[in-house]
Image (tube, rainbow, N blue to C red):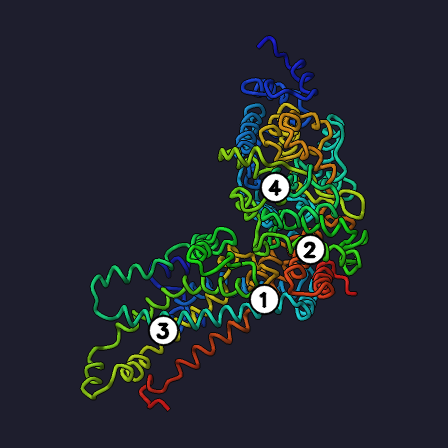
Amino acid sequence: MTDVAADRRLGKRPARDITAWDRLKVNRNWLGAWYMVPAAAFLLLFLAYPLLLGVWLSFTDTRIGQAGEFVGLENYEWLWEDSVFWMSVFNTLLYTGVASIIKFAVGLYLALLLNRHMPFKAIIRAVVLIPFIVPTVLSAIAFWWLYDSQFSIISWTLRQLGLIAANINFLGDVWNARWSTIFANIWRGVPFVAITLLAGLQTISPSLYEAATIDGARSWQMFRHVTFPLLTPIIAVVMTFSVLFTFTDFQLIWVLTRGGPVNATHLMATLSYQRAILGGYLGEGAAIATAMIPFLLAAIMISWFGLQRRKWQQGGSDG
Amino acid sequence: MSMFTRRNLLQGGTAVAAAGIVAGSGLTRWAEAWAQDAAWKPEAGAELTLLRWKRFVQSEEDSFMQLVAAFTKASGVKLTVVNESLDDVQPKASVAANIGSGPDLFWGLYSLPHLFPAKCTDVTDVANYLGKKYGGWVPSAQVYGRSGGKWIAIPVAYNGNVMNYRIAAMQKAGFKEFPKTTDAFLEYVKSTNKNKTPGGMALGHASGDGNAWVHWCLWAFGGNLVDAKDKVIIDSPETAKSLEYAKQLYDNFIPGTAAWNDAFNNKAFLAGEISWTNNGVSIYAAAKADKKQDIVDDMDHALWPIGPVGKPTEFHVAYPLIAMKYSKYPLACKSFMVFMLEAQNYDKWLIDSVGYLTHPLNAYDKNPVWTSDKKLTVCRDVAKRTLTAGHLGSVGEKAASALADFIVLDMFASYVSGRETVKGSIKIAERQAQRLYRSRA
């Protein structure tokens, strides 16, 4: 004891070996890892854990209110032979495919228009965003009235004009219901695509267009060889998000049809909710939700590898 | 105050009270006397939260909140009431049961307590006390309230789902009174359609009205989803007959019913677009509230026609109240359950519910609401007449899931709308039911 006290007085530290931990604390190469720990913990806790829990649940017969047991692939076996599940897969692919393509086309067109100089540009750009700003549930309720089988303003107008004799059965007929919900989704999703692509368009330097004009390029050629290539990275991001949002859409369908008529508009997300939460079969609902993952991964892969693997972006030529 | 001693107030309380007695300060004074005498004394410092379905009739909610205030004043228990839409009560209760935390009391739909019977407080003592005092529970209340020989919920009320019809249109169709058999009903449906005054019933994913009518139809012809052992028996000639019958009805409905959810028929009836539909008496209440006197005068309610099975096959909504086992104040929960169903409170609440809610205890047959307006009288008997979710089978989670998954509703909708054959639609429903009941054919 006295030795130690004497050492302290003399300002000496007790001699000990430098441990690996000490090195890790000061090593610059590890510093980056340390700074990433909070973010990684956040991702693990709020993203990876729920995802893995969902996948785990899909292999159990868990019901709401009672813990389940591991049942292997039983939930998937039932789903495999379940015509309602396959219809929801078909509906989801149709809904996502058609809505995403049209949203992209209309969004790109709107973005090109909005990129031009015109009077009241700022106001028009703000107005375009409105469908995106309105809470989905509110816009869905508005569509619900528009599509009402007795009180639809669309049916009423067409009837007054003498174009139709009876009200249009928007949500009661299988294909009408599908197109009606897809239309509502497009209406809501176009502003997101348009405004994001507009942001992309504005990063393209005007000097490129000037050079192209001098070279005698027509407007289509300018679009094809200047605008579009430079816009692809943004398109990849926008379409990835757009596809993901559409694929996982829930509120619109739930308000408009609850998956009816006869499950014709059930998406995988709504069917999963109906079975897991309302029906109480958490395991099966989780299996439907898990079945969405491969589709979503495929969509992401296509967007990123298909649209971003352009050599010119790294300075090479675009083969 | 000297007129009201605790004893004579409580004695008076055993008889069915007239509306005047319970009004205003009388209720509070009675409540205070009741609280002193009650068998279930709330824990000291108890505070409760009750999650209930959002009201359909404003006067019912107002009356309920008065009742809650009187309870708080008398017992000192603070009771917070949270309202959720009908469809959201079940998921919230299930999650609360799962994690063991949340509102102390849940007030939801028919089989709710059977989704997690082990998580519900045993309320056998409360049910026995009330049953003895008020003339016994109706049979369906015993099915909904009990599990494994004990009471796990108090079925507080029922919501009758009855036929709503316009009188003039019925008479024009050649009927003096609403048809009492399925055959006569089909004639009525055809005639009203021919007269350009059609009706309709929901075939979209309408958990209330849609499920009510397709189950009536299935059971009226002897069809059943499962038998007493929960074996799936939907594939039967009786089911096929009920589908054929429903198809004939559907062909004479107003167009668009395949899209209807629970709200569509109310709107269409009030707008004069349809002359009959199935619903609670909320259309009538709304017509009164909106001062649509022509509709109020020209409409009435009827019980469902009886099919070849020869007995009522109605399917009304039951609203059980559960006390969760995790609640720190089980006595306070029980105390509120009893307080709510005591005549002094319940009678007034029933009157203010204007027929939308029906009692589960026989003594309340005498409530003035059933005689003050003859158009509401039919709803008096709905609790006695209703069959339970799952009918022959168990009333538990599988029956609840089958309803939530619209298995029977989709079977009817897919056949009558022409998407499937009789065989095809039954096969799909059978497959779905086997999935829920985990019984492979």
Task: State which tag comes first along the sequence, 3 or 1.
Answer: 3
Subunit bearing disc 2: B
Residue B181 — which label? none
- Mark toward the viewer: 4 or 1: 4
For the residues beneath circles 4 and 1, the answer to whether they share a chain is no
Q: Is residue B60 left or right of residue B432?
A: left
Q: Quadrant of the N terminus of chain B?
A: top right
Q: Which residue is mark 2?
A: B248
For the residues beneath circles 3 and 4, the answer to whether they share a chain is no
**Where B19 falls versus B287 (above or below)?**
above
Q: Which residue is mark 4?
A: B169
Q: Secondary structure at mark 1?
A: helix
Q: Quadrant of the C terminus of chain B?
A: bottom right
Query: x, y percentage for residue A166?
Result: 51, 57
Subunit bearing disc 4: B
Type of amino acid at the residue the image marks with label 1: Ser
Query: x, y percentage for residue A249?
Result: 49, 62
Q: Secondary structure at mark 4?
A: helix
Residue A88 — which label? 1
For the residues beneath circles 2 and 3, the answer to whether they share a chain is no
